[in-house]
């Protein structure tokens, strides 16, 4: 049981089956200009856009134009990409690693809104309204992003205004998902919230093994606590209960969901 106090530390980055696989990007490619991208990286950026149901109809030439305008950058673990309320003038495609979207108060207490994984295209709102980042955005692990200037996006909308509707659909979809999470946080008990969060992690960042669905994401108990707006002690207690009831297992610093049905039933409980 001592491993429950450790980080979940898988040695690979696998996405759920419905997500496109991420592509490792060499550190020496940091700041590579979009016009110097190889065909595989252009394809990875195209796949990230079209993997989203709201953007899947975007024509290849539109995405290639955004590729021409952008650049790669690799951020180290914990590095601040954008600070809350500071200018955020480009959208990003997450190619590998993850971005932690969080807030921190004057006392240093951190709350995580969401982690953005590979194949997400993010920061449309701060680019469109020009009011700065809504979160502190930090690299979670070594993270490679493709940065696309906001002006390139506006130029694309001027040429093909129908694409703006797709972005608005995406913003609405994410807003509804956020409010769904807020309702569960406000109304559900902690065990249900914990189960719901583990289900989401299993869906987005899990792989099927003989023992169950293994989370392939590196998250400490502090990270889980920040996601759940709870104390680390509360997270530890619930993990121990889940392990004791055979619903999850933590072994060698890896968390595996053994009984998805039971976890889903817990998430749906009041």
Image (tube, rainbow, N blue to C red):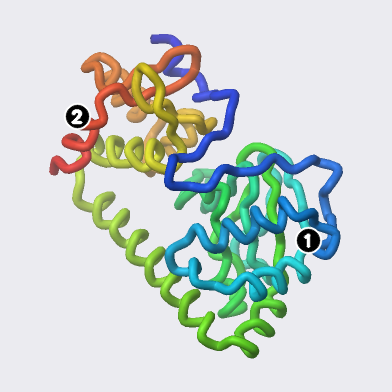
Instruction: In the rendered view, tell whether residue 121 sits above or below residue 206.
Output: below
Instruction: In the rendered view, tell whether residue 109 sits above or below residue 166.
Output: above
- Whole-angstrom CA distance, mark 2 to mark 1, is 45 Å
Q: Indicate the position of residue 200 as horizontal and vertical percent values.
A: 36, 42
Q: Which residue is mark 1?
A: 71
Left or right, 226 with reference to 44: left
Left or right, 119 with reference to 114: right
Left or right, 173 with reference to 99: left
Splitting the image into 4 quarters, where does residue 22 fall?
Answer: top right
Q: Which of the two residues, 211 or 187, is positioned nearer the viewer here?
A: 211
Q: Indicate the position of residue 14 as horizontal and vertical percent values.
A: 53, 35
Instruction: Look at the numbered disc 2 and give the secondary structure of its residue.
Output: helix
Q: Indicate the position of residue 231 as horizontal and vertical percent values.
A: 39, 34
The residue lying at 40 percent from left, 17 percent from top is 250
The residue lying at 31 percent from left, 54 percent from top is 181
Q: Tag 1: Cα neighbours inside 10 Å, few (<14), some, or many (≥20)?
A: many
Left or right, 166 with reference to 242: right
Q: Which residue is mark 2?
A: 262
Instruction: Look at the numbered disc 1 and give the secondary structure of its residue.
Output: strand
Name the residue furthest top.
1
The residue lying at 35 percent from left, 17 percent from top is 211
Splitting the image into 4 quarters, where does residue 257 fall?
Answer: top left
Q: Which of the two residues, 117 or 87, is positioned nearer the viewer here?
A: 117
Q: Quadrant of the N terminus?
A: top left
Splitting the image into 4 quarters, where does residue 97 fall?
Answer: top right
Instruction: In the rendered view, tell whether residue 189 sits above or below residue 68.
Output: above
Q: Indicate the position of residue 75 as horizontal and vertical percent values.
A: 73, 46
Instruction: In the rendered view, tell whether residue 233 sits above or below residue 127.
Output: above
The residue lying at 56 percent from left, 52 percent from top is 119
């Amino acid at each position: 049981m001592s491993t429950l106090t450790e980080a979940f530390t898988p040695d690979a980055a696998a996405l759920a089956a419905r997500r496109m696989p991420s592509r490792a990007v060499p550190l020496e490619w940091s700041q590579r200009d979009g016009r110097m991208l190889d065909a595989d990286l252009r394809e990875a950026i195209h796949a990230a856009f079209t993997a989203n149901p709201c953007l899947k109809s975007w024509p290849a030439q539109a995405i290639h134009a955004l590729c021409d305008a952008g650049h790669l950058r690799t951020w180290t673990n914990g590095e601040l990409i954008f600070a809350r309320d500071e200018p955020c003038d480009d959208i990003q495609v997450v190619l590998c690693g993850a971005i932690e979207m969080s807030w921190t108060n004057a006392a240093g207490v951190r709350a995580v809104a969401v982690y953005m994984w590979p194949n997400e295209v993010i920061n449309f709102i701060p680019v469109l309204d020009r009011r700065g980042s809504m979160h502190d955005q930090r690299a979670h692990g070594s993270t490679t992003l493709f940065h696309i200037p906001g002006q390139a996006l506006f130029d694309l909308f001027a040429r093909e205004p129908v694409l703006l509707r797709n972005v608005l659909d995406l913003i609405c979809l994410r807003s509804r998902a956020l409010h769904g999470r807020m309702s569960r946080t406000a109304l559900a008990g902690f065990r249900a919230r914990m189960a719901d969060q583990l289900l989401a992690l299993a869906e987005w960042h899990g792989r099927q093994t003989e023992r169950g669905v293994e989370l392939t994401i590196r998250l400490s108990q502090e990270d889980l606590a920040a996601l759940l707006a709870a104390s680390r002690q509360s997270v530890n207690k619930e993990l121990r209960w889940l392990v004791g009831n055979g619903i999850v297992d933590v072994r060698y610093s890896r968390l595996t969901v053994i009984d998805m049905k039971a976890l889903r039933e817990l998430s749906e409980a009041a």
